[in-house]
Image (spheres, rainbow, N blue to C red):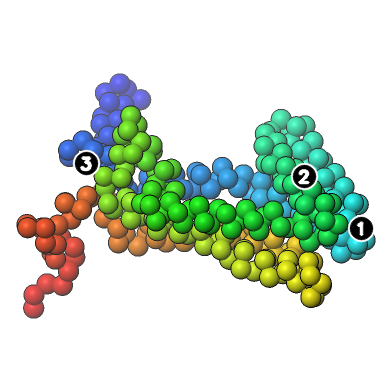
Amino acid sequence: MTEQYRATEESVLSEDRHSTDGTPRVTEDTVEALVRSQLSKALGGKRGMVEAAVPTLTFTIGYVVTTELGRSITAAVVVALLLGLIRLVQRSSPQYVITSLFGIGIAALFAMRSGNAADAFLPGIIYNAVYAVVLTGTILIRWPAIGLMIGPFIGNKEDFTSWRTNPAVVTLASRLTWLLILPCVIRVLVQYPLWLAEHYEWADTFALLGFSKVAMGWPLQVAAFTGMVWVLARGRTPLGRSSEDADGPGGQENPQEKGGPEAP
């Protein structure tokens, strides 16, 4: 690649990422790429998802078969350690295994303290409830969490709040944040009643609680990401335009620019 070609390519990329007045332009591609990247980091890819699910399944199946809390927790820890050892042998990051071990440790503390195996799932329920409340709060105060992720990526790097000057970006970020909240709400609505039933011995729901935790883990996150892509693909949010640009003279919307119906 020649220097002239490289300079031309960089110029085109710069024009794509910025509007005519030099301000950053938000596009579906930039937001989708960021969401995909952040989701991949959070879940650790397919392997990270499996590493998070296997210890939970081991604990659930172990307790259903043996009804011994200590052995079931030990089995889950051993499996997690084996997965971590494989990571180390392959010289790859054990980050997600360590996270899984941390989660097992917290769950074990809750269960061992009460002596009720179902309490191992209580920290996850609490986490999802708090997470949903916090994210909802960011939307209500007009600082949606996804916007905090998008801002440094497409806004002024020296002023990470610059993305909030574009109402379209704030609206888009709010919609995407709602999609992050939805899986948390679903988990709480399903798992909390199951925990109550098991904890107070209304019904034997331990196996359902364990399997629902796995089934509503990464599959719901992937579903949330799919929803984000769908929202972005619909193209109803004027990503690259501010509210002033979208309005016509006198602050009125121009139906032709908005794709409104033409006169017969």
Q: Position of residue 25 (x, y in %)?
A: 27, 43
Instruction: Identify the residue position indicated by label 1 in the image.
Output: 68
Which of the two discs, 3 and 1, sits closer to the camera? 1
Rendered image quadrant of residue 90: top right
Viewer-closest of 130 and 243: 130
Q: Is residue 20 above or below residue 199?
A: above
Residue at image coords 82%, 41%: 82
Residue at image coords 30%, 58%: 237
Which of the two discs, 2 and 3, sits closer to the camera? 2
Amino acid at dot 2: Gly
Name the side, left or right, on which 125 lies relative to 33.
right
Closer to the N terminus: mark 1 or mark 2? 1
> Which label sits on residue 105?
2
Residue at image coords 30%, 61%: 236
> Which label sits on residue 19?
3
Amino acid at dot 1: Glu
User: Can I make out residue 222 in this image?
Assistant: no
Viewer-closest of 200 and 8: 200
Rendered image quadrant of residue 204: bottom right
Amino acid at dot 3: Ser
Name the side, left or right, on which 154 lies relative to 217.
left
